[in-house]
Amino acid sequence: MPYYYRVHGLTIDSDIELAELPSAVNPSALDVTIRIGNVAGDSGSPGCWVVDGYEVKGRSALFEIAGTGRYLARDGQNIVVDPLPQADPGAVRLYLLGSALGAILHQRGLVPLHASAFERNGVCAGFLGHSGAGKSTLAAMLMRRGYRLVSDDVMVIRENSFGAIVAVPGVPLLKLWPDSLALAGLGASVAQIDTPDDSKLRLEVKGQFETHDVPLRNLYVLRWMSPESGSPELVPLPKFSAMMMLRQNVYRPSLIDAFGSERAFLTFASRLIPQVSMFEFHRSMRITEAEEQVDTLLEHLQNN
């Protein structure tokens, strides 16, 4: 039985039930198929790149997760999943919706960013940063204050038919450490879904999720202060620095080189930067100052 879903602006036909994703009802066109099948490694063959954990050859990207299985993303249109018999279903979906779908986005000429984003009153802002920068925690705290999640971890940005830069809804999940969940105060408003990693929770937030493209106003690059003290501050980024920050915060950045899509990135950045303001958000790692940091961010959003 096929399942139909919508994520990152793509309509998906899947052999695997992906309850995390919004359903696509009676889709008229399909962008990506997900099938269960055999996946064989190709790392020893001529012309195969090994980057970021992927084996890349031509328009294909293969990767293997120990204890879970193999995944093959091809031509921006097809994903083949070869799960191990004992694989945890939550783990199979986790890497399918992350690394496998991320490779598909690159193959389609999109530029996925390692970012989280939220919306209120029809306007979106996003947080850029590597793992551990606090993207999801900050987004969760904003959700408690009435903001809606647009994406977590992987953010797709595009230019719409009117030439405006918009953020596209991603997977309606937050991935949080237990202490971050307690800090955000979301325990009663979200549901935990099965996960292979009990130390980091995957939380369904469909009730607080934006399902339509949203105009993107600001991007914030998250930086921890050193030393760990001082008031939070927001520093505007000049255009060249903004472009460098975008490049550094691409999701699975090595795939840009592997697929020869540097020109696509430069086109993306040249269209985004004139329309979207970018700032560095410097803040302390002290958990007791988290609410003050959110106050500073919200005040900045209201005035910029």
Image: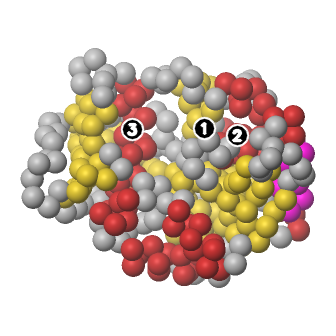
Tag 3: Cα neighbours inside 10 Å, few (<14), some, or many (≥20)?
A: many
Question: In this view, which residue lies farthest toward the left?
Answer: 45
Amino acid beneath label 3: Tyr
Badge 2 or badge 3: first in the primary sequence: 3
Q: Is residue 122 above or below residue 117?
A: below
Secondary structure of residue under mark 1: strand
Q: Which label belongs to residue 174?
A: 1
Residue farthest to the top, as pictured: 86
Q: Is residue 232 visible?
A: yes
Q: Residue at x 23, y 57 (%)?
A: 49
Which numbered marker is on residue 137? 2
Quick one: which residue is furthest to the front in this view?
Answer: 227
Q: Which mark is residue 95?
A: 3
The amino acid pointed to by label 1 is Leu
Q: Please tell me whether mark 3 sits on a helix, a strand or a loop.
A: helix
Q: Nearer the viewer, mark 2 or mark 1?
A: 2
- Quick check: is 190 in the magenta stretch? no
Q: Secondary structure at mark 2?
A: helix
Residue 18, given in percent of the width and then of the height, sits at: 41, 35
Q: Quadrant of residue 303?
A: bottom right
